[in-house]
Image (tube, helix red, strand yellow):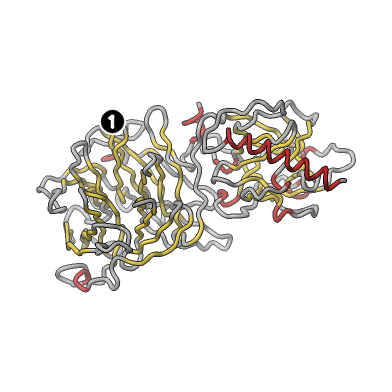
Amino acid sequence: MKKLIRAIGFILSITLLCSAFSACSGSAVKGHKNIDGLLEDCDYYIIRNHATGLALSANTFGLLDGSLTSVRTYDKNEQDMSMIWRVIAVDSSSYYFQNMATEDRYLSVKKDSKKNGAAMCLEKMDETDGEIFELEKAKEGKNSYRIFSRLTNFCIEPQDGIKDEKTPVIQNYLPYNKDVDYQVWDFERIGDGSKALPQMLSLSGDTQNWSCPEIYNYKDTYYGFIMAGGITIKTSTDLRSWKKQGEIFSPIPSWMKDPVKGVENGSIWAPGIYKIGDTYCCYYCVSTSGSQNSFIGLVTNKTLDPKEKNYKWEDKGIVIHSYKGNDFNAIDPCIVLDDKDVPWLVYGSYWSGIKVRRIDKNTLKLADDDVYDIAAAQSRSGPEAGYMIKHGDYYYLFMACGSFSTGYWNGVARSKSITGPFVDADGKDALKQGATPVTSYRDGFIKCGHSSVMTDKDGKQYHVTEYFREYEDGKTSTSLLGISELLWTEDGWPVTATTPGVVSKLLD
């Protein structure tokens, strides 16, 4: 009989969940109010421990399957999305808690363990009671509740009631007197779920060694072009699961490392993929660390699908070369089309900074000698890796600010002209290092340098970046692929899942 009752309850829960998900699908929802519950269904909350005020959060920004949870300080200026939860009603007192840092991950009992002391983590929905939590009103405050796992009937708490930052969150017995305040959680509603918040995509497969990533959707297959070997290409059919396809150059042509024609001991950096007319153009650069002896090259193709008969990369040689003593460095190429579909080359870093020059549609190389300075460097702290797109009335210049040693972050400035001036949200010119942050450090997400923007065929936009993860022993991972939904504020500035103040920028 108990199994039958449990089965009926499970079916009812899933039915209600499907109804809620039909309203809560995607990043924005219309509040699902037909269940008279304790919280506003589908809205956003910060869940604070009553004893400490520390917020329930996902470790490693929820970027890993099974990411553990802990309690940490919620910074109102940073507004870390790993501490923001969407509540989805199952019935009048039970909810799913969706973490807003990374898509499709929910608070869960780790491995559906029924032991007291089992850790709380993030999991994708697996249709078990391990993700369902029941709320019991507590006397401590108006929006204060104890949170029980439906799977075990244990209450969640910071481990052993410890009040330290980063204390793990576990499930545990409810003491007989029910008066321990560390098992009470205060729910602070911060936004209506009808407004979207950007999330990181849940990625899998070959997501390591993704330096300087750019992605292009060709016939419903996503092609990632990466700074590795002879320009590594990785593919995905859903933008989330990735595998290596091959390389453009294998081996790297000898002329590229020729001391006279190319760059001695150079390696290929920062490839970018663009369509100009009916030609797919991969602009890249060759250089060595800290050197001005660099060049930007070009290789073209009529298709991106290696199974098509006309698939062949054609080496077009050098587009522009810089040498020691020049006031620029010929690296980090990007192509942007203006309103008349004329291509422009964005390039440069350090030295005098980022520049833009016109490209001839026919030759696909420089059209004239005119050079426009659009962002100035400051010693060895950037900006570099300029990437430009057109959105609305403005051209937006995304840049890698800082440096790898001091801490990369992505910034943006905008202009109504492709040749500038570019200014940030405070009106500061990019020629004076003006840049509005698009990313910032999060637990498990650091040093996001070279980035790009991918506009999909359905119009959705994604901020694509390399990032790194720092381990407890102080070591740093290889470059990892990070993809965040890219949304726009009402006053026309781009935001990602790690933009400082993202909640206020979109919900206020």
SS at circle 1 = loop
Residue 286 in view of the camera = no
Residue 397 occupies quadrant: top left
Residue in view at x 66 percent, y 38 percent: 17
Residue nearer the viewer, 364 or 382: 364
**Residue located beneath label 1 in the image:** 393
Pinpoint residue 286: horizontal percent, then vertical percent.
25, 63
- Up the image or down, 66 lies above or below 6; here it is below
Say whether residue 12 is left or right of residue 99: right
Spot the residue most to the right.
176
Spot the residue most to the left.
368
Residue 290 occupies quadrant: bottom left
Pinpoint residue 94: horizontal percent, then vertical percent.
73, 36
- The crowd level at tag 1 (other Cα within 10 Å; few <14, some 14-19, many 20+) is few
Residue in view at x 18 percent, y 67 percent: 262
Pinpoint residue 214: horizontal percent, then vertical percent.
35, 53
Residue nearer the viewer, 19 or 149: 19
Pinpoint residue 45: horizontal percent, then vertical percent.
62, 34
| Amino acid type of the residue tagged 1 in the rendering | Asp
Residue in view at x 66 percent, y 37 percent: 47
Residue in view at x 36 percent, y 32 percent: 425
Q: How many marks?
A: 1
- Up the image or down, 493 lies above or below 239; here it is above
Say whether residue 210 is left or right of residue 362: right
Residue 395 in view of the camera = yes
Say whether residue 124 is left or right of residue 349: right
